[in-house]
Image (tube, rainbow, N blue to C red):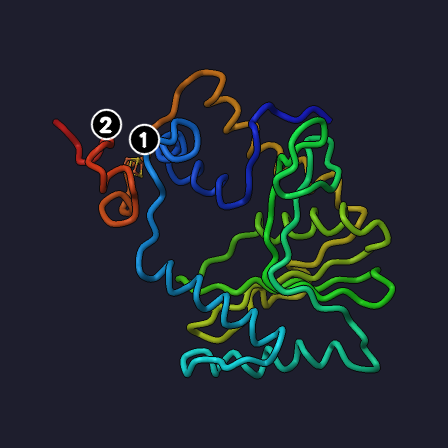
Amino acid sequence: MIYPDVKFFSHSALQMFETCPHKYYRVKVLKDIKETFNDAAKAGLVDHKSLENYLKTQAYLPPHLQKVKPVCDIILKYLQSPFNYVLQPESQFALSRKMQSCGWFQKGDNAAFWRAVLDVLLLNSTMTEAMVIDWKTGREKFDQDQLATNAIFLFLYYPYLQKVITKYYWIKPAKFTPEQAGEGIYFREDLYELIQEQMKRVAVVQRAYDTGLWKCNVSGLCKNYCAVSQAGSCPDYPRRN
Ligand code: SF4
């Protein structure tokens, strides 16, 4: 397997590139623009922290998160007999270019290349099966790539792991996706193919590095959701005809 020469990436960085290569260039490569978070994104971070604290210490959950409490309580039941799962809320994972586990900020030969944070990770006592739940606070959409990424990290971190079930939990409608049987379920034999799929995404970013072409992708997100437009610094938005 040959991996491209992007310094490091994450699912959210790839998503940023796929939404608008120029934004990625300014925020991640040139770094002349700082990513901004709107109020909804900031509230989402606070919700993640509240849910993490509830899972760790059963700390107070604010009223708007009470509807998530039954799900959290089911997760906590998995820690008890007869299931005896191990819970890791908000776990950070990093892989090097050689696809070996490494420190989040590791430099040198085995430097961190790919990073992921898993909101809720449950591992069975023999570490052969895992469940991952990703809390989602925004608008409902289905993103298979993030689920696949979760599975890749776990298979590479836990050598005995055979099966990963990974799902989103959408806080506003209080529901899980995927709901269809089979989706979001991965087996170790899928690993090579899963990595290849994600590396194809990285290769597209690499092409932009190689060619210096960082296309502006003008969309409905430009006006209110882009730090480049908010800084009045996008070459294509607003359109200058
Ligand atoms: S304003 Fe739109 S086109 Fe310009 S960088 Fe932002 S997302 Fe891309």
Q: Secondary structure at mark 1?
A: loop
- Is the CB–ligand 1 distance for label 1 below 8 Å? yes
Q: Secondary structure at mark 2?
A: loop
Direction from residue 235 to residue 52 in the image, left or right: right
Q: Measuring from the top left, give residue 159's x and y in whole percent.
A: 84, 49
Amino acid type indicated by mark 1: Cys
Q: Measuring from the top left, give residue 186's x and y in whole percent.
A: 72, 54
Direction from residue 199 to residue 237 in the image, left or right: left
Direction from residue 6 to residue 234 in the image, left or right: left
- Is the CB–ligand 1 distance for label 2 below 8 Å? yes
- For label 1, the residue is 216
Spatial CA distance of label 2 from label 1 is: 8 Å
Amino acid type indicated by mark 2: Pro
- Quick check: 221 above or below 208? below
Quadrant for the N terminus, please: top right
Q: Which residue corresponds to the image point at 28% horizontal and 37% vertical from the top-left?
A: 228
Q: Which mark is residue 230?
A: none
In-front residue for pair 148/111: 111
Q: Which residue corresponds to the image point at 75% horizontal and 38% vertical from the top-left?
A: 100
**Circle nearer the N terminus (2, 1):** 1
**Which numbered mark, 2 or 1, is in the foreground of this view?**
2
- Quick check: 201 above or below 15? above
- For label 2, the residue is 235
Q: Measuring from the top left, give residue 39's x and y in whole percent.
A: 31, 60
Name the quarter showing ligand 1: top left
Quadrant for the C terminus, please: top left
Q: Which residue corresponds to the image point at 32% horizontal and 30% vertical from the top-left?
A: 216
- Quick check: 175 above or below 224? below
In-front residue for pair 66/167: 66
C-beta proximity under 8 Å, tags 2 and 1? yes
Q: Which residue corresponds to the image point at 84% horizontal and 60% vertical from the top-left?
A: 128
